[in-house]
Image: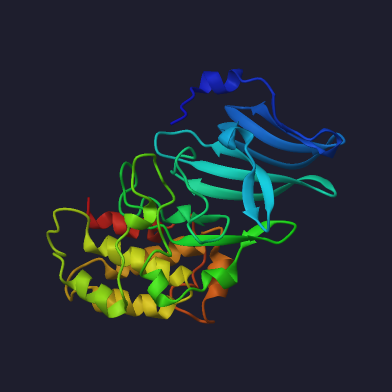
Amino acid sequence: MWLFSSHEALAQPRRTLLDAGAAGRVAAVPQGMGEELRLTRNGRTLWKARTQRFTPFRDGAPVPIGDDATAIGIIGWTGGAYCCWTLHLFRQGSAGLAHIASLPLGKRDPDEIRLAPPDGPAIQIADAGFDFWEAPISRAADLHPTIPFRWSGRALEPDIAAMRRPVAAALGTACIEMAAPEGFPPPEQRVTTYADPDTAIAALRAQDWRSPGGRHPGVEAARLATCMIYAGHAAEAQRLQRAAWPAGVPGLAETERQIAARIACSPFAAAVRAANAPGAPLLGGRCQPQGPDQVAVFSLGWR
């Protein structure tokens, strides 16, 4: 991981990270305890963002974004042992250099992420709002509900049509980890898949929910549910969770509240709602970033 002290951050000079001449430039400017990333053209600031540290993504190599178009990425890092990175993408068009997307990567190391899944869109990311699912720090499970993106010609945006996938895909490899470290099997070979909802329900019910001794089955139930929701099947996701959860075992209500709370505060909430039927369950919440439902599962002590 990239770790910098506050003194190092303060000492950083202004750095030009992307220079397109008269079309514009992107520079990291010292700002307080961190840096501000600024896109400027003709002396005007067109876009800016602040964080601890900015660096070029993969040494400035072009990033495919679809339709044979590419962009240049810059990574913003908040600081801290476990969090967090954002990928800012810029592209030169007829009007000059433009900011086309900021993609939150959560706690995923940019050196290890794979943006393009096999036979998938040019860019697909896991919603980082579902990181740290059942513990606030350390090696907490991440659920990985995913958002495919499309290049509109002006911006990189969630592809709602591509989000709507069959239930079998949602129970398969539609939602997988982005990390693809060298020497590890690819993410699609590391995820548990299920043929259909009944198979998933039976597999979950067969596990030990009271003294699992490892990852709690409720985490896997939540992973499957969130993937189904992001694939347009919120009602079926709720049915699967409720059918799989054994009677008398705590955690179902907390899990549903936490799913709803995190979707409500997701930067992709509008896209998730649009991918589902009107009035679908778990999608009508209001965002309360510091609300107790954001961490309702933590109180269950699964770790």
Q: Pick the residue in front: 69 or 273.
A: 69
Q: Position of residue 147 (x, y in %)?
A: 52, 61
Query: What residue is drawn where x is 53% and y is 18%?
Result: 7
Q: Is residue 138 above or below residue 289?
A: above
Percent position (x, y) of residue 97?
78, 43
Please name whichever residue, 42 or 20, is drawn nearer the observer in this view of the structure. 20
Asked if one can make out residue 290 in the rendered structure from this viewpoint, the answer is no
Side of 134 where 10 appears, left or right? right
The vertical placement of 98 against 81, above or below, is below
In the picture, measured across the screen, residue 206 lies left or right of residue 71, that is left
Q: Is residue 194 left or right of residue 207?
A: right
Residue 51 picture quarter: top right
Q: Which residue occupies 58% across, 72% down?
A: 161
Q: Position of residue 74 (x, y in %)?
A: 62, 38
For the N terminus, the quadrant is top left
Mark yes or no: residue 7 visible.
Answer: yes
Residue 130 picture location, percent across and down: 42, 56
Count of numbered circles on the image: 0
Q: Is residue 83 above or below residue 245?
A: above
Please identify the quarter of the rendering in which residue 41 is found: top right
Picture colour scheme? rainbow
Residue at 83% over, 33% down: 21
